[in-house]
Amino acid sequence: MRHATAGILAGLCVSVCFAQDDAVVITATRFQDSKRELPVGVTVITADDLRKSASSSLPEILAQFGLVHIRDNSGTPNQQVDLRGFGITGDQNTLILVDGLRISENELTSAQLNAIALESIERIEIVRGSGAVLYGGGATGGTINIITRRAQPGTVRGYGLARFGGYGTAEGRAGYGRTGDVGGFSLDASNEDTNGYRRNNHFRQTNVAGTLEAHGDHARGYLRFAAADQSLGLPGALTEAQILADPRQARTPGDKSDRQDGTLTLGGAWNVDRHDLAADLSYRNKNASALFLPSFFHTNVNVWSFAPRAKLRFDAFGRTHDVTLGADWERWDYDNRNTASGEQTNQALYAQANLWAAERTRLVLGGRVQRSEERLTELLLPPDERRASHTLEAYDAALRQGFGAGWSGYAKYGTSFRLANFDENACFGPPCAATLLDPQKARTAELGAEYERGGWRGRVALYETRLENEIYFSPAVFANINLPPTQRRGAELEGSWRSTPALEWRGSLALLEAKFRATGKDVPLVPDAIATAGMSWSFAARSRLNLNARYVGRQRYDNDQDNVFARRMPAYGLLDAKLEHRIDRVNVALEARNLFDKKYYSYGLWDGANSFVAYPQPGRAVYLSLAYRLD
């Protein structure tokens, strides 16, 4: 029955129509919705924001514009992403999606963000503390949904970009797309090659992605594919003494990694009278290898997912309401030839109702029930097999009230969960745990207010998240464990102001607190504050100056769960600049990263004595780019 349903819905060959206006998001309902009416705080990073950035790294752009904390804890450009202060488990508590489909890994590795062509992105929607009802596990910190561009009928788009600069960087990106009355196609390709800031940190990545579309008056469909190939030198973490002597040296000059990814998605949507139907059938493969002398690791992962859903509208009490109903089926097959193999199957049903109690009062109620089956077979230390089954639930209740004059407020309460990934359940040495880790569960409450009028936009929010069985690595037993109760609290402030048609300002601030509730100790790798500021000034008809500043406060070192190390990771501030000039369809840009050549690191590990090891981050770098765009 499952395969028959998949064939019927996939055969519709129709797709969700993503809106082009930044006032519309889909992550809150998995369908079109107005940002101004959602009872959750949403940050939207537009395609224009991406062009303004002085970086071609998507994690860096998220940090500049999205109040997202990132850290380099492996020497890879795919940095760890952390929403709302989860520290070293930030990747596992921040769910990353592309067009609503999960790309977060089921391992202790970061999502492959640099495999996504920047010019193919229409916008990025960041929803903090929300997403478990509609998307399942790993969304306690929030969801980041990357929406790719969808051309309108009768349009043509094309671009080519070359970028050269610091640390031997050479980058090329190109794409073309054409859409007619009944269908269209697009193709994006990119290649980046850089020596990196440190020795043995050479990075090369090649990406190709394309879409075939068909559409009619009430239906739309697509077949999307993507492939990426990456090679990376791994210089290793340096001791404090080594950083002082030469921060660009490599501690592990022979270590390296390679990775190949491929994704194929068939999806669509169909409008029937007042209702919308949609489905996505997706397959993803990852083939990765790493050389940590003298050891060699090879991992192969296959992921299948099927996500049918419907948005049904109905009238009651003189108003139009809607309910989203959906099912998710997901299967992960994991094979690490050196250590373990495993599988995880998730089957879920969910519903979310959007009700209008009054003209300015919106109530959202949602629930999810998920059945998960896990297996992990250890090949070493000692060989064994462990299995577990879980029935998990997530609920949301949220209210938004408009007050007029540009003001509105919202309140939200929800629950979420997270399953331990394959690496977290793995045994690194005897004695091994007799059972797999219990699922992590969380409860989050949030209050917020928003203002939007004229050239002003702003949001302020207070939140608290309480967790049971948080999954965390314990150096005492050299294994991942379920922690006693923990909590996260914080305040967020975002704002922007278009003071003149040519000048725009923006700023944001997050105050973070992460504690072990039983002891009152700080959770490591959670900064006490994050702040960003930016300015975009079109000082001439074809010229623009963009400035982006970012501050990250002090934080405990990794491995210091008991807070006994007297020192903390130093705070740091960075400034990036980009000067652009346009000549017809050609755009010339001069970019400067880390303009003041700040010496810093975003990840540090306490050595258990009186010092630490860390990954030094790049100093000042300048880049020149030349871009041509048809659209």
Image (cartoon, rainbow, N blue to C red):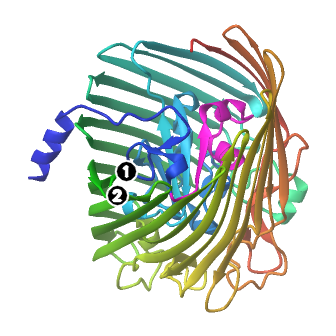
In reply to whether residue 373 is colored magenta, the answer given is no
The residue labelled by disc 2 is 334
Q: Which quadrant holds residue 213?
A: top left
Q: Can residue 248 be seen in this snapshot?
A: yes
| Badge 2 amino acid | Tyr
Determine the residue positioned at 58% across, 32% down.
118
Q: Position of residue 619 (x, y in %)?
A: 84, 44
Instruction: Estimate the x, y position of residue 272 in percent, counting from the top left.
Output: 21, 37
579 to 335, vertically: above or below:
above
Residue hosting label 1: 300
Q: Residue at x 84, y 62 (%)?
A: 571
The crowd level at tag 2 (other Cα within 10 Å; few <14, some 14-19, many 20+) is many
At numbered mark 2, what does the secondary structure look like: helix, strand or loop?
Answer: strand
Which residue is painted at 70% across and 67% down in the image? 491
For image coordinates 57% across by 39% down, the residue present is 114
Residue, far bottom = 518
Using the rendered view, name the quadrant where residue 433 is placed: bottom left
User: Is 201 in front, or is 189?
Assistant: 189
Q: Which residues are magenta?
A: 39-66
